[in-house]
Image: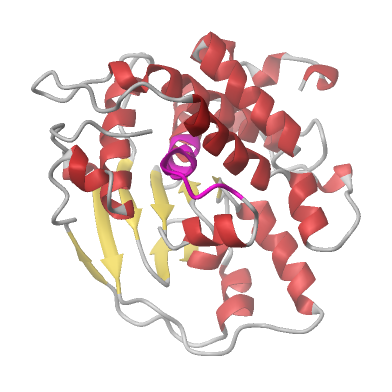
Amino acid sequence: MTFNDNVRIDTSKVSKRSGAKRGGMIAGGGGLVVILLAIGSQLLGINLMPFQPLAEDLVGSGPIAAEQSGELVGCESGADANTDAECRMAATADALDRYWATQVGNYRAPGPVVLFSGQTQSSCGAASSATGPFYCPADETIYVDVAFFDTLSSQYGASDGSLAQMYVLAHEWGHHISNLIGSLQGAGRETGASSGSVRLELQADCFAGAWVQNASTVADDGGVPFLKPVTEQQIADAMSAAAAVGDDHIMESAGVGVDPERFTHGTSEQRQRWFMTGYEQGPTACGTFDVPASEL
């Protein structure tokens, strides 16, 4: 989607961390298939427990260097968001927060979205750029390394369009909504095609679609809509991102057979379909925990 050039961005809804990295070598050889599957289990998901061992496998051992934290600068308007990925995340966070405040009773915003590079620490453990964006329920915060968008496009085949990137943040925000309404707490940690984990991820896709449908009606403090109406091509961009992180696509990319018993996020088709359910019917249609397995 395209931001209106003169919309004003509230950058307090994001923070930026930089400078963290860990010494060591990236794992290679036969371990890459295992690592790719492990990454797939985290892509656009929820981190319910520390995944420090995975981060160490990916980038080696040793202490994480000190980070620098600060505000995001140079992101004042929609024009900035249309040309810069970090500014796009800031503007998207602002628009998402304003939308969901009108949809959920007793709504509270997540912590400022953490934009990081390399590695960072969360209340759910260490995060690396390789594990992808995630929502940490322990601190109610979303963590995103914008370099992941290049990975999503180059390695998983997603579009590099703006809505493909915004979908990622909208999906993670959806996990926060699931947390607020109690779905997250009842999901459990089992895997499988009809597991609570899959239902949770599909609900987040549905919530993302609901926001996209209404995003052009959300305005800044001056009454300027954040976004221009979505186009069919932009919807296709978001759908490509949803398909790229389907369990079946991840497993096929890893060169292993598709095993529904290991599903944690749902198939590419399911993720696209639930995104469109939210887009066409709104957030009240996102009851993925209320439907039988055959309707997921």
The majority secondary structure of the magenta stretch comes to helix
Residue at 44 percent across and 26 percent down: it is: 180
Residue 272 horizontal/vertical position (percent): 65, 30
Residue closest to the eye, 254 or 38:
254
Q: Decide if residue 158 is in sight here.
A: yes
- Quarter of the image that includes the N terminus: top left
Residue closest to the eye, 164 or 141:
164
Q: Please say whether residue 13 is one of the residues in the magenta stretch.
A: no
- Quarter of the image that includes the C terminus: top right
Residue 113 horizontal/vertical position (percent): 33, 48
Answer with left or right where residue 127 lies relative to residue 277.
left
Residue 57 horizontal/vertical position (percent): 64, 78
Residue at 69 percent across and 37 percent down: it is: 197
Magenta segment boundaries in residue numbering: 158-171
Residue 38 horizontal/vertical position (percent): 70, 61
Q: What number of labels is visible?
A: 0
Task: Name the image quarter holding residue 6.
Answer: top left
Answer with left or right where residue 23 lies relative to residue 114.
right
Residue at 42 percent across and 54 percent down: it is: 144
Residue at 56 percent across and 69 percent down: it is: 52
Q: Is residue 126 above or below residue 166?
A: below
Answer with left or right where residue 221 lies relative to residue 19.
left
Q: Please say whether residue 164 is one of the residues in the magenta stretch.
A: yes
Answer with left or right where residue 220 lies relative to residue 294.
left
Q: Decide if residue 50 is in sight here.
A: no
